[in-house]
Amino acid sequence: MDSPQQIKTFFQENGYYLARGLFKPAEIAALETEFDRIVQQLARTGNLDNVQWTGELQEKIGGKTSMITHTHNVQCYSAAWLRAIQSDPFLDVAEAILGPDIILHHTKLFQKPRENGMPFTMHQDWSYFPSVKDTMIAGIIHVSRATDEMGCLRVYPGSHRLGRAAHTSGQEPSELLEKYPLENATVITAEPGDVLFFHYFTLHGSKHNRSNELRKTVLVQLHAGDDVIEDANKHPNVRLALRGRNHGMTRDLANTASA
């Protein structure tokens, strides 16, 4: 494992950092069991509706004819997943990037189906849950392996320096995104237990899962404790202090924190 300073430097330069083997094989195997139970629970409760990411650009790369299984906040389903996002190895890397105060915004489960699992066009994430200081990062926990054939994530190193670029949600035509085609992005392959951290300005996307394997990931969205979410937030906002403290917490915000 790299030192905290090496992690911070690489992240600042590239807008992402891949932490290999952050979860041990036995740990990720247990988390995969819980992952599968969550998917089964969604099916049992009639909530296994596969979703599609809409928009002109998404349709252009085949998103209209493919699906992905998705749900927010795995920690609401499973204590094992709550422990995972509170684990020291995971938070140590997050702290190297964000500092000592780390706040959970939300988590997402993604299961990309076999053979035609949904692609994601190149995009930034900032417009979905903008924060005042723009400290928001994601940590993708790879529950299964992720190869290019399986539709692993692709990124443009250094693209976080674009800042809040307009029309980069991936849902509408964009002159900027035309300069960053999915085909030319850096392919980030991963093994079970690897975690990919990236800034919400970093351009990223993925191709179809064309393999006969399920691609399983859990995305953890985090920000620094001295940052706050703007009113344009479009996602659940847990506001849970995973390490350190939440500087902007109030009684009213605590009462309205969404699971």
Image (cartoon, grey):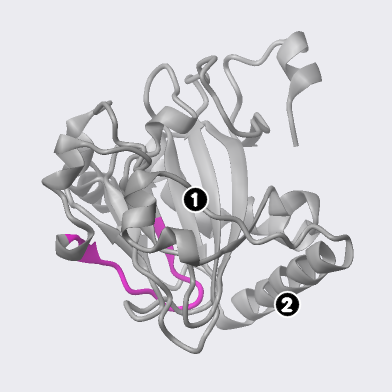
Q: Identify the mark nearer the N-term, 1 or 2.
A: 2
Spot the residue most to the bottom.
Answer: 212
**What kind of secondary structure does the magenta stretch mostly adopt?**
loop
Q: Where are the magenta residues, as a range?
A: 185-196
> Does any portion of residue 1 appear in the rendered image?
no
Q: Indicate the secondary structure of the residue bearing disc 1.
A: loop
Residue with the mark numbered 2: 33
Front in this rendered view, residue 234 or 103:
234
**Residue type at numbered disc 2:** Thr
Assess disc 1: are there few (<14), some (14-19) or many (≥20) residues with their C-alpha within 10 Å of its C-alpha: some
Q: As displayed, is residue 232 above or below residue 70?
A: above
In the rendering, at what x and y percent does residue 103 appear? 57, 33
Question: 2 and 110: which one is in front?
Answer: 110
Label 2: element kind = helix
User: Image point 59% across, 14% down: which residue?
Assistant: 248
Name the residue beneath numbered marker 1: 53
191 drawn magenta: yes
